[in-house]
Amino acid sequence: MGDFLSSVLPPGLIDVLSALIPPVVVGSVFCAFVIQLLRKEMAPRRMDGSLVSDDETGESAASDKRSAEVQEAGAANETPIARDGERSESDGR
C-alpha cells in the first residue's frame, strides 16, 4: 500500500500527511469531548436543577408528582387572558 501511495502522490506530500495525522486525531477527539460536554450541560433542566429527561428513565413517585405539578402550571399558562367580551391576542391575527 505504501508503494502505491508513493507512486501516486508527490514525495513531499506523504511526509506532510504523516505529520498532520496525529494532531488531527487529537483535535477531533478533543472536539468530540467538548461537544459531548456542552450537550450534557445545556440539557433542559427544571427549577430544582434535575434533568427533564429523568422522567423518561422511570424515577420514583416523587418525580411523577413534580411532573404533574409542571403539567398543571403549563395548562394554566395556555389559557388566554381575556375578560368577558374581549378578544384574546391571537384572535385578531
Image (cartoon, helix red, strand yellow):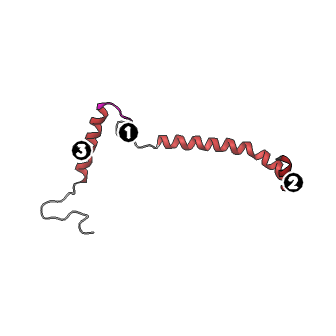
Q: Assess whether mark 2 and mark 3 are in contact (beta carbons under 8 angstroms).
A: no
Q: Nearer the viewer, mark 1 or mark 3?
A: 1
Residue 54, relative to residue 7: is it above or below?
A: above
Gap between marks 1 and 3, in whole Å?
A: 19 Å
- Where is mark 1, residue-wise? 56
Q: Assess whether mark 3 and mark 1 are in contact (beta carbons under 8 angstroms).
A: no
Q: How crowded is mark 3: few (under 14 residues within 10 Å), some or many (20 or more)?
A: few
What amino acid does circle 2 point to? Ser
Q: Where is residue 76 in the image (x, y as percent from the top left)?
A: 22, 49
- Where is mark 2, residue-wise? 7
Res. 57 image quadrant = top left
Any magenta on residue 30?
no
Judged by its main secondary structure, the magenta piece is helix
Task: Work out which residue is located at the far left of the displayed protein and give it.
Answer: 84
What amino acid does circle 1 point to? Glu
Report the span colored magenta: 51-61
Q: Residues within 10 Å of mark 1 (few under 14, many from 20)?
A: few
| Numbered label attached to residue 66 | none
Decide if residue 9 is on the left or right side of residue 37. Answer: right
Q: Residues within 10 Å of mark 2 (few under 14, many from 20)?
A: few
Q: Element type at marker 1?
A: helix
Gap between marks 1 and 2, in whole Å?
A: 56 Å
Q: Where is residue 51 in the image (x, y as percent from the top left)?
A: 40, 38
Residue depicted at 41% across the width and 43% down the height: 44
| Numbered label attached to residue 72 | 3
Q: Where is residue 66 in the image (x, y as percent from the top left)?
A: 29, 37
In depth, the one of 49 and 54 nearer the eye is 54
Residue depicted at 53% across the width and 40% down the height: 37
